[in-house]
Image: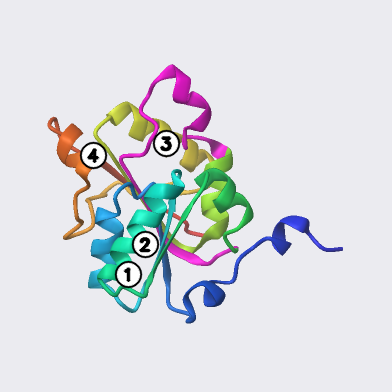
Amino acid sequence: MNDPARDERIAWRDVFGNTHPIELEIGPGYGDVLLAYAGAAPATNFFGIERLAGAAEAIMHRAAHRALTNVCVIGGDARCIVARVIPDASVTAYHVYFPDPWPKTRHRRRRLASVDFGEALRRTLVVGGVVHVASDLRELLEKICDAFTRAGLVRALDAVPPTNRATTVFERKYAGAGTHYARLLRLT
């Protein structure tokens, strides 16, 4: 019997026209990190999920202006898109930098720190795939890591941010006290 959820999964070849590795940024904001990575690694495809459709379109405009053909950004709820659209074992890395929403009571329903979302990330990561998480709020970072480890990802104890990672506008604005970083892995 067909699984309706599987019928919604995209084929990366249809999106990018090739079978290069996929890295996915959740909440790219203005696209600072996504576009920097895409420019530095043309043999990797970079997919972004931005909650606001207008922001996703603006990033795509910036990518086109830079002639980056390895970028695709869509607007929508990352939790839904990862759970229903991203194929199993197809993403080599997720990037979650300064995730929205900030820890306000009214934003709780949209937080990424859930076991369900962690399970969707784990399912879509290749074995050996990685989730990079950074925030200026240690408590938020720890909640995300706790949920994702309960979902079966393993937190690296020696985590340091990727070398030459571009900083976001939000990081430069809010991380005066420093950036907290974690790396989680899919081992099996």
Q: Mark 4 is on which residue type?
A: Phe
Q: Is residue 155 visible?
A: no
Q: Is residue 91 magenta?
A: yes
Residue 77 place in picture, x, y as percent:
52, 44
Q: Mark 1 is on which residue type?
A: Ala
Distance in Å between CA atoms under marks 2 and 3: 28 Å
* Residue 60: mark in rendering: 2
Label 1 close to label 4 by CB (< 8 Å): no
Label 2 close to label 3 by CB (< 8 Å): no
Label 4 close to label 3 by CB (< 8 Å): no
Q: Name the image quarter holding residue 23.
A: bottom left
86 on left or right of 167: right
Label 2 close to label 1 by CB (< 8 Å): yes
* Residue 170: mark in rendering: 4
- In primary-sequence order, the first of circles 1 and 4 is 1
Residues drawn in magenta: 88-115
The residue labelled by disc 3 is 144
Q: Name the image quarter holding residue 185.
A: bottom left
